[in-house]
Image (cartoon, grey):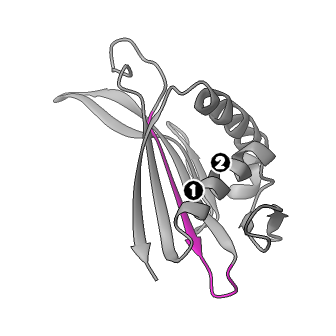
Amino acid sequence: MKIKSTRLKRKTPHLTITCDLPIFKPFITLLANVIERHPKVFSITLNYSNADYTAETGGYRPVEIRIERKQDNRWYICYVTEFTYIATPFGQESTYAIDFDFSRGLGYQLGMAPEPIAAYGPLYSLWQRNFCRYHSHDVYQCKTRIEEA
């Protein structure tokens, strides 16, 4: 599968972020800003949440994004996962709503079987635009976990 690559000219001139689907420029900028704050780490996991999101009222769903630096100093998006609440016999439980798992080459939507990531191009494009729009309106709080190289 061909890897799409986008180079972003910033303070870090050789910063490249890749994944197996096209990447929306504002999403690259968002990730690049985080990478620039942690230039020497191996991986970064971003957990975005909105305090107003509940099972009863909905809202902006939580999102987790993991990126890793490869040996050639390129950053690779490992996965992007959006969570939702579902009803279980034990109450409400958080589960994957959408999962773009680039490290395994699979995409997933709640209630559907996993498919090759290539089938998720249009949904991934839409998801990125929406996420960047929500992020620009400061609806998320973000927790960052890093792993040293």
- In this view, the residue farthest toward the top is 57
- In this view, the residue farthest toward the front is 11
Q: Which residue is mark 2?
A: 30
Q: Nearer the viewer, residue 91 or 3?
A: 3
Q: For residue 68, what is the image quadrant?
A: bottom right
In the picture, measured across the screen, residue 36 lies left or right of residue 5, that is left
In the picture, measured across the screen, residue 43 lies left or right of residue 125, that is left
- Residue 70 screen position, x and y as percent: 62, 81
Q: Amino acid at mark 2?
A: Leu
Q: Is residue 107 above or below residue 130?
A: below
Q: Is residue 69 above or below residue 146?
A: below
Q: Nearer the viewer, residue 46 or 106?
A: 46
In the image, the segment drawn in magenta is: 62-73
Disc 1 + disc 2, Cβ < 8 Å: yes
- Image point (38%, 40%), residue name: 95
Q: Which residue is mark 1?
A: 34
